[in-house]
Image (cartoon, grey):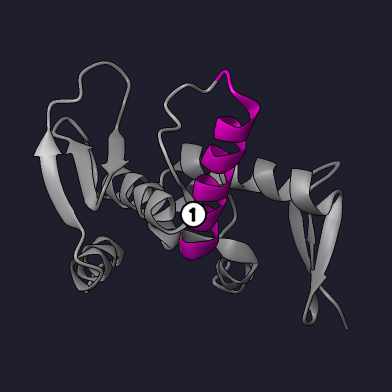
Amino acid sequence: MTLCEILEQNAHDEKIVIIPYDLGGRLKGLYCDGTIALNKDIDTQAERTCVLAEELGHHYTTTGNILDQSQPENRKQEMHARLHGYNRLIGLQGIIRAYQHRCQSLTEMAEYLGVTEEYLKEALELYRQKYGTGVEVDNYIVIFEPRFAVVEKF
């Protein structure tokens, strides 16, 4: 079962309907009252997976209409939904698994995790904002600044 299929099954289990929809413009997905509209023009399975994870994040974390992103509370809820998706698809453990799998670049890492490179970069930036220059997880240190790296402690 692919990661996208797992997310679709999760949506089904939660009684969330997923519909393909012509959202136009740059909008890839939209969540409203138990329904996720996914843009019919999504190109790849990885992109569909990323969009679906974020929209499921809205199901779990968002209340009300947050379309007006000029409002600070709406931006905060948007970031919570994105963080939910990033943690679900990537997370610090996923970063470490990619390191253990010998991924040598962000492209390889994104492919290994089943996400787009852009989504991975956005997640790493949010993790940098959350954790600062680095964070220790089990026997590893995930470094975000000055250059992204994973180091195994001995």
Dividing the image into 4 quarters, which one contains the N terminus? bottom left
Residue 92, compared with residue 139, is above or below; it is above
Q: Which residues are magenta?
A: 70-88
Q: Name the secondary structure under disc 1.
A: helix
Residue at image point 32% right, 43% down? 47
Using the image as rendered, state which of residue 144 and residue 123 is in the foreground: 123
- Residue 74 sits in quarter: top right
Residue 54, compared with residue 42, is above or below; it is below
Residue 92, compared with residue 144, is above or below; it is below
Left or right of residue 135, residue 34 in this image: left
At label 1, counting other C-alpha atoms closer than 10 Å, the crowd grade (few under 14, some 14-19, many 20 or more) is: some
Count up the numbered dots.
Answer: 1
Type of residue at label 1?
Answer: Thr
Residue at image point 31% right, 65% down? 3
Residue 85 drawn in magenta:
yes
Left or right of residue 83, residue 141 in this image: right
Residue at image point 52% right, 39% down? 78
**Which residue is label 1 attached to?**
61
Q: Tell me where residue 75 appears, x and y as whole percent.
A: 58, 32
Residue at image point 52% right, 56% down? 84
Q: Residue furthest front?
A: 64
Q: Tell me where residue 113 appears, x and y as whole percent.
A: 44, 61
Using the image as rendered, state which of residue 111 and residue 44 is in the foreground: 44
Dividing the image into 4 quarters, which one contains the C terminus? bottom right
In the rendered image, is residue 95 in sight?
A: no
